[in-house]
Every structure is written in structure tokens, then in C-alpha cells.
Image (tube, helix red, strand yellow):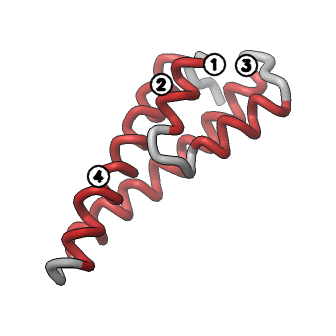
Amino acid sequence: MTLSVKTFKLISTLEAISFLVLLGIAMPLKYIWGLPQMVQVVGMGHGVLFIMYVIGAVIMYKKLNWSLLTLMIAILCSVLPFGPFYVEHKYL
């Protein structure tokens, strides 16, 4: 499977944005105002993007000859708000 760096950057950006929307908008709507619908929609999209990000990180590990430490940092950053932006800036 081929994945360009540009495509991985797009996936990374979308994953980060979806996580921030989930944490900053959808979760407060659910737990403060009792409106869980947005969590269902944004959560599903974020889940798909998260899986694509992790698979993309493994592909970038092979394609860009990242060290195992760099791969682990990229994967760890996938669960931190703003983390994928750091990976884009530092490693891509």
C-alpha cells in the first residue's frame, strides 16, 4: 500500500481536528446539555480517522525510515490533543 506524505498530513490534520471537536464541543453538549447525538457522529468519524492515522504512521515509519522511537512518539501523539500537529511539524 502506498501512502504519500501529503495524504498522511491530511489524515493527521483531520484526526487532530476531529479529536478537538469531540473534546471541545461534542462532549460538553452530551454531558452538560444532555445532547449525545454529536458524540455519536463525531466519535465515529474520529474513530475511523484514528485508525487511518495509526496505519499511516506505520506506513510512514517504513517509507521515511523512522526509528522505532519516532513511530512510538507518533502513535502516542495520536491520543493527545494537538499531538498530530506536533508530529506533522517535527517529523514530516
Instruction: Check contact, mark 3 vs mark 1: CB within 8 A.
Output: no
Badge 2, how many Cα within 10 Å: few under 14, some, many 20+? some
Q: Which residue is mark 3?
A: 63
Q: Which quarter of the figure has residue 16?
A: top left
Q: Amino acid at mark 1?
A: Tyr
- Residue beneath the point at 84% across and 25% down: 67
Labels 1 & 4 near each other (Cβ < 8 A)? no
- Disc 4 packing (10 Å; few <14; some 14–19; many ≥20): some
4 or 2: tag closer to the N-terminus: 2
SS state under label 2: helix
**Mark 2 or 3, nearer chain start:** 2
What kind of residue is marked 4? Val
The residue to which callout 4 is attached is 21
Q: Quadrant of the C terminus?
A: top right
Q: Where does label 2 land, which residue?
A: 9
Pointer 3 or 1: first along the chain = 3
Residue 61 falls in image quadrant: top right
Q: Nearer the viewer, residue 49 or 23?
A: 23
